[in-house]
Image (cartoon, rainbow, N blue to C red):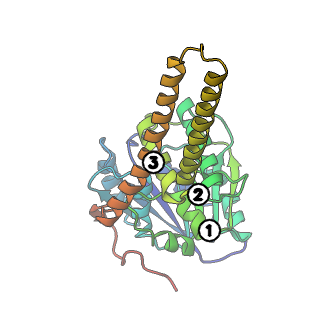
Amino acid sequence: MSANSEKISFVIPCYGSEYTLESVIDNIHQEMQKFTEYTYEIILINDGSPDRVFSIIEKICAVDKTIKALDLIRNFGQHNAIMAGFSVVTGDIIVGIDDDGQQPLEALNMLLEKIQDGYDVVFGADSGKKNGFIRSIGSLIHDWMGVSFMGKPRGVRFSAFFIARRYVIQEVMNCKNPSPFLSGIILRSSGRVTSVNLPFKKREGSKSGYTFGKLLSIWLNGFTAFSVKPLRVATFMGFLCALSGFLVAAGTIIHKLINPSILAGYTSLIGAILLTGGLIMLMIGMIGEYIGRIYICINNYPQYIIRQYINVNEPFGTNKS
């Protein structure tokens, strides 16, 4: 890797990581000793964590004034917390990393090499199968959603461990949606995206903060934030349902004319009503999801609110020439 004076900004959203955060930061310091051609900074974002995370962050920042920290007034979610961190980065290359110690920072050179090869964004994807059933299903849905609705290149895998050029992050920051879907915004900002399969580590300390409810919220956000395809699918399903109903009705009438002694099929009738009613409710719910998100955006719901800054002295979101 050629010598340069580029700066790397590590953005770490923190939630429920009182037992792992310090080791993650120590790991960053240790690994960056290998990259003497880069300077670096660390930005910690307390995403309304209910444990002692912010106390630990305050202690870390008191010892090391080069580490920046943001304290959000409540839990806004991982993507919102990352967007808050983006607002104070000063690096040329931004690295997103979790606070649980699973991402293999020793493989950072592989991501940096891809950036030097000309890619704008590189995801470090887990090559193992250490996640639970719900997280594994979530990853599959996330991948399918990216390909189907966002134009993600096949073979590219999303991950919370990523590295991106500053100009991509500056474009990402233009999104003011109160429920940002980071992977989709990145894909909308650049087509030079790839991923590298890496052996992730076992989770240390606490369990994942992603419950099924939180994952469901992220999926709905991804479905509705970047495409109207779900509405078109609903329209197609409605057409199929109407066509099926017409064919069944026509067949029943013809059958009754041919054989008047046939009794009316109440069971099949109730089944058809329940199926049709369920599809209608599904479509109404989907339309309602879109309308609800439009309502939230119109009312300028905040993407994040920062209660306190630590070791932050520079203008937020400043562009570098």
- Which residue type does callout 3 highlight? Met
Q: Residue 286 carries which label?
A: 3
> In 3D space, how far apart are the residues under numbered discs 3 and 1 (Cα atoms)?
51 Å
Sequence-wise, the earlier of marks 3 and 1 is 1
Q: Residue 36 carries which label?
A: 1
Does the image show residue 205?
no
For label 2, the residue is: 162
Pointers 1 and 2 in contact (CB under 8 A)? no
Left or right: 56 in relation to 128: left
> In 3D space, how far apart are the residues under numbered discs 2 and 3 (Cα atoms)?
31 Å
Q: What element carries label 1?
A: loop
Depth check: give the residue in front, 147 or 269.
269
What is the x, y in percent for residue 280?
46, 41
Depth check: give the residue in front, 302 or 296.
296
Sequence-wise, the earlier of marks 1 and 2 is 1
Q: What element carries label 2?
A: strand
